[in-house]
Image (spheres, rainbow, N blue to C red):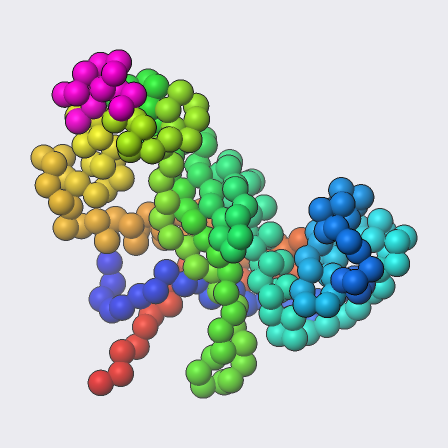
Amino acid sequence: MPAGNFANLFVVELEREILSLVEDERSKYNSLKELRRQCSSFIYADADKIYGYGKDLSDLKKIGFRDIRINASDIPRTTCRIILDGFCARLNSLFYKVERFTPAAQAFDIKNPIALSLPEIMLLKGCEFRTVFLKHPLEKTLMFGLIVDLKFRLECNGQPSSYFYIRNFVSRKYGDQVAREVIREIRVKTGDLTPTGRRNSEASRIRYETILDIMHKVGGKLELPTGDFASLTLEPVNIVIEV
């Protein structure tokens, strides 16, 4: 692990600053959910506008959306959403199960579950992520990025679960001693504890390296749903502390 202070922020740079989208007035539509059902394009509401993007925008144009070319920095929230959609699609292609929330999303590697001693319990490794835009301190321009953090999911009999539920489930079925052993096993596999059950002083390094591993699987070039591409740094942002 290199020396320094790092944030789990990975910079995203668009290859083209001008985006080709379609737009319409937000006031014309009562329900975004209904609008999304009517078309196959991506839709995002930003202030008083609705922006559409994707490889085929004919369905939106038929109902009144018009073509625009706009600077990505002029609509930073929409640009963040476009980057997020591209990142989700890339994780999907790598067999990650993506779940979208507001404002973050998470994804878990369903192809490579982490083996545990009880077949009913499964541990999935993944990440939680969101997009951000920040003003560059020197150039005074907007920069875009992905905040990525390590995330694990526990499943019991195929359903999302928690430490509390698993402890009770295993205790009822196998006894309290087995329940304690399984919880410790899970925390060892997540890197929180050492195999002897003590707090793992290397936990931060393990999280850092696991996040980097996920980012390297994604790769340094990201295809966006607009058909554009973005470059993605594979090392987190280094924080300079002033003295």
Residue 106: x %, y % from top left: 47, 45
Relative placement, left or right, of 76 versus 23 is left
- Classify residue 39 by image quadrant: top right
Quarter of the rendering occupied by the C terminus: bottom left
Does residue 76 appear left or right of residue 50 in this picture?
left
Q: Quadrant of the N terminus?
A: bottom left
Relative to 49, is 222 above or below? above
Look at 51% across and 84% down and name the residue there: 140
Residue occupying the point 22% across, 14% down: 174
Residue interval drawn in magenta? 168-180
Q: Toward the viewer: 78 or 58?
A: 78
Image position, residue 99 (x, y; %): 52, 42
Give the image location of residue 212, x and y in percent: 36, 53
Can residue 134 be seen in the rendering of this structure? yes
The residue most toward the front is 30
Q: Is residue 174 magenta?
A: yes
Left or right, 68 with respect to 219, comes to right
